[in-house]
Image: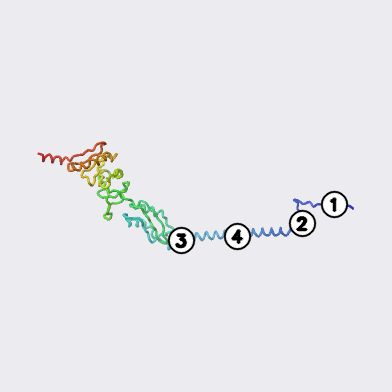
Amino acid sequence: MKPFPSVERQTPGGRDPFRRPSRNQHLRRSRRRRFLRQGTRGLLLLTLALVLAGWGGVAAMRWLHGTPLFAIDHIVVEGLQRGDEADLQRRLSPWLGRNLLASDLNMARLRALESSWVQRASVRRILPDTLAVRVQEKQPVAAAIIDGVIHLLDARGAVITPWSQRLTGLDLPLMSGLEAWSEGQRPAQLRAGMAALQRLVSYGTGLQDRLSEINLAHPDRLTVHFSDEPAPVHLSREDVTVNLDHYLAIRGDIRKRAAAVQAIDLRWRGRVVVVPDSEQIAGNKGKDG
C-alpha cells in the first residue's frame, strides 16, 4: 500500500490559518496598548504642567511689577562734577515711586540727556529700590558773551550753561563781538570761533596758554588777544595760522615797540603788518617839536 501523499497547507502570506496566535503576540499587543496609554497620560500631564508653569510665571511677573517692595525710593547720580545735580534729580523725579523692575531704563536715559551738562548717560537698576544714573559731562572749552551774559561753550560751540559763581577754577578763552551779529547768525559765528581756537591749539608753541580772547565782530577777520601781547592780532578767517610762524619769530622785536603798536595784521600771506598807534605817534611828534 502506498502512503498518502502529504498535503501542504496553503496560507496567504505563508500564515497557517489553523495555527493559534502565540502567547508572545498577545503580550506585545498588550504592551503597545499600555505604552500608548502611558504616553498619552504623560503628555497630558506635561501639557498641564507647562500651562501651570506659564500661568505661574505670568502671575509672578505681575506680582514683581506691582509690588511696592521694588518701588524706586532713591536716584543716584554718578560722574557729575560741574553740572547741576539738583537739575538732573528734578528731571528724573517722575521715576520716584515707580516699580524698579517695570521702569523703562531707556526713557530715563533720554530724560537725563536733556540736562545741559550731560554728554552721555547710562542707567541701571540696583535692587531693591535704587535707580543709578552714570553720566559723562560736557567739557567747557571756551566762554562767550551773549546778550551781556557769559556762557560756557563745548567743543562744537554749543552753549552748555550760563556761567555762575559756583563754576570756579575755569580758565577759558573768551569769544566776544557777538553783538555785531543777529541772533540767527550767532551760532555760525561761534562755530567759526571754536574752529579757529582748535586750529590755534593744535598749532602748538603754547599759544593756547596765552590765548585770552577771540573777537568775532568783523566779517573779514578774527581779532585775537594774547595775555602776554599788549597789541591785538588780526587773523584771516580762511586760515588763522597764515603768517603765524613769521609773527612768532619777530614778536620779541614787536614787544620792544609795544607802546607804539595798535595792532598786528597777519591776514596777507608772506607779510606781517604792524599797525602803528596813531595817537602815540602824534604824541611823539609833538614832543619832538
Q: Are marks 2 and 4 in contact (CB under 8 Å)?
A: no
**What kind of residue is marked 1?**
Pro
Q: CA distance from mark 3 to mark 2?
A: 70 Å
Q: Is residue 37 above or below residue 143?
A: below
Q: For mark 1, does the 10 Å Cα neighbourhood hold few (<14), some (14 to 19), or many (20 or more) residues? A: few
Which of discs 2 and 1 lies nearer the camera? The answer is 1
Residue 64: mark: 3
Q: Earlier in the sequence, mark 4 or mark 3?
A: 4
Q: Residue furthest bottom?
A: 69
Judging by the rendered image, the residue that carries numbered circle 1 is: 5
Residue 19: mark: 2
Q: Earlier in the sequence, mark 2 or mark 4?
A: 2
Judging by the rendered image, the residue that carries numbered circle 4 is: 42
**What kind of residue is marked 2?**
Arg
From the top left corner, tell me how far across and down residue 56 is, in percent: 51, 61
Q: CA distance from mark 4 to mark 1?
A: 58 Å
